[in-house]
Image (cartoon, grey):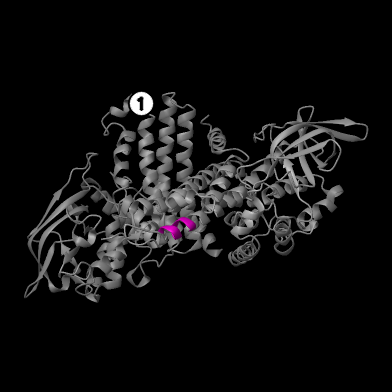
Amino acid sequence: MTLVNDGEVFRTEIRDFLSRAPKPEGLRDYGPTPTAADVEPGRQWHRYLADHGYTCLHWPREHSGADAPVTIQAIFAEECANAGVPRQLNITSVDLVGPVLIRFGTDQQKDRHLEPIRLGEHLWCQLFSEPDAGSDLAGVRTRAEKTDTGWRIDGQKVWSSAAASADYGVLLARTGPEKHRGLSMFIVPMHIDGVTVRPLLQIDGESKFNEVFFDGAQLSDDALIGEVGQGWEIALLTLGRERLTLGSQAVGMFRLYAQIVEAARDRGAIDGSLARSLTRLWARMWLMRYTWQRALDAGDLTSPAFSVLKLMASETERDLGDLATDVLGIDACVDPADNELVHHMLVGRAQTILGGTSEIQRNILGERVLGLPKEPR
Amino acid sequence: MTASLSAAESRELAQSVRAACNRLAPEEHVRAVAFDRDGAHRGFDPALWRALCGQVGVISIALPDELGGAGYGMTALGVVAHELGRALAPVPFVASVLATSLIVQTNWQPVAEQLAALAAGEITAAAAVCNANGEWGRDSTALTARRDGAGWFIDGKMRHVLGAGAAEMLVAVASIDGQREIFLVEAASDGVEVRPERVLDGTRPMAAVVLRGAPGLRLSDGPADATIELCVQRTLALLCAEQVGACERVLEIATDYARTRQQFGRPIGSFQAIKHRCADMLVDLEFARSASQAALQSADDDDGELSWRASMAKAVCSEALRNASHSNLQIHGGIGYTWEDSAHLYLKRARTDEVLLGGPGYHWDRLAAEAKLL
């Protein structure tokens, strides 16, 4: 009960803080990952949040975090979405790399990297997926070979968000033949020789993800995180964290929904059939948000309510993007740069792929929640 | 002001209802009571109902203190409903809740004795609140009331009245000069004809009710639209909790089968075609659980949100249970189409619950209207 009360007090406090905070020029709610143009305003904004104690809420106090429960993190995410600002420079640095270093890093690695992440000085990217290791992530082939002074890296990564702007990356690479035990995790400075980043142009014209090529890049011995062979275990820790704040997406969805209804009214397009489609989708958004709240209140991070959130959120977001263009009629054919609703139709296609495809999500629900047997591999 | 159950108390209540259902309403008993092939079934097990009312207090739990109830709210009743739904318990829970809540919301003092008998499970009541076809609508009623001397007399007929076949009392919504009011009619009175119907789901027995100048006790003291609406919405929230319980059980049955049934040398649940279907059932179930809980919570909080939440819940839970019961049957293959398998019991429950008190289409449109889209 006190938690809920504290939560509401915190909500008021943070709403007040966000409304008064000076916004750097060019700042927009760019989502979990900034484009190249978003990085500078994003960094300034992150620094302002950090100076007021609002970054790295889930980190332990000894690393200048707030040791905040999930409810508080969730409220913060939602209020940022409400205010139309990002809640941090990018998700990889604070939410994925931070906890990995805190759990598996050496004292030296923590001292060197955590504070610059907290202050937004260093932007990190994830170097996990490869052209031949997407859904089957453990199939990575990028090699890390032991040398006298450290490690030599050769191979190729892909879908690395913000790699072109990143100062560091966490790299999942092969150090042995066994599928899972042959993987290790490394820290890679992105500007060393032998690392080449090539931005990929997305279907919506933006460029958030990248290809990264390794051609004999040299890492020192202290680049290894944890033990040799511990890479898969570390990678798993980073997956699934996003569910904690997924419900905050509902804020953006409701905003888009309002735009869709307005566009439909402007065109006189609302008939019984469209009204029912809109209502169904509104209900799914509302229930996604409520399910998230229900899971948070129950406090069990392994509950089915938490497990279904990623699938609920991404498919609802996809369908919202599709409905956005359904109301436009003939205007669905215009340049996405000129019409936000058309842009959302395109972005919707990404939702069911990024962060684990819907097909992989269904496997996870079937196997880990419902206890169905694994498929033959 | 309703008292609320702690999480531990909710679990305890759920366990006691589940234990009673496991003991007194296993599947073979449900079949004997509701799906007897000789057609002699009544769809209602008085002994089970008395046990649930007497030992667990499934009706009295939500009655106010002054009526000898526990004063707990709809969320507590929702816990009961969930378990009854899982078991497809052949008891007149939904009908009784609607009938008793209509009585409690009016001048119940003259019928306090009957109310106590209802809560104890000694007698049952059915509510006649729909149009002549048995369809729920905001303004519908098929019955009219007229005054003659000191008494009121009711005329009209209504199909598909849930639980009316076994009910000793009927709570009837009848109009006086076009205004709907609430009456109590003894089923044994002159002028009352109750004809049990042949139904799809034997655990949801229904009857056609024909009233020809049947004497009725007027419980309301003026137009009762708001009261009727409130009672129906609360009943919808509970019906949804039953649907969620049934949906949860159907998913268990489907995954149990998918884990054990072998084809091509391995369990069929290892194939994505089956596994993904089960995952979709899980997502639908969690959506439905949220919808039902949100409606029950609003009923207790009296926060003015119950109307739209009840409609949303009815639409979402109906569709979830319908889809789950279809998927379960499909996953079972040929065996799922046999009388011996339980798949059809849940399918028939799903298709019946779906159309009671308004189908998904009706409730989606109501929700659209609340959002000013229609």
Q: Is residue A27 visible?
A: no
* Secondary-structure class at tag 1: helix
Q: Which of B307 and A255 lies nearest the eye of the viewer?
A: B307
Q: Which chain is indicated by disc 1? A: A
Task: Say which residue label 1 marks.
Answer: A329
Name the spot of residue A2 as percent of width and height, x first: 55, 64
* Residue found 82% across the figure and 45% down from its top: B107
Q: Is residue B165 above or below residue A277?
A: below
Q: Identify residue type, mark 1.
A: Gly
Name the main secondary structure of what is drawn in magenta.
helix
Q: Is residue B150 left or right of residue B263?
A: right
Q: Is residue A366 visible?
A: yes
Q: Residue furthest front?
A: B38
* Residue found 32% across the figure and 37% down from its top: A345
Looking at the rendering, in which quadrant would you find the N terminus of chain B? bottom right
User: How many numbered marks, from 0 up?
Assistant: 1
Span highlighted in magenta in the image: B253-258
Q: Is residue A50 left or right of residue A82?
A: left
Q: Is residue B264 left or right of residue B307?
A: left
Q: Is residue B305 above or below residue A302?
A: above
Name the spot of residue B230 as percent of width and height, x first: 68, 43
Name the spot of residue A302 as percent of width and height, x first: 43, 64
* Neighbourhood count class around disc 1 (C-alpha, 10 Å): few under 14, some 14–19, many 20 upward: few
Image-quadrant location for residue B51: bottom right
Q: Any magenta on residue B122?
A: no
Q: Is residue A215 above or below residue B374?
A: below
Image-quadrant location for residue B206: top right
Name the spot of residue B248 as percent of width and height, x first: 51, 55
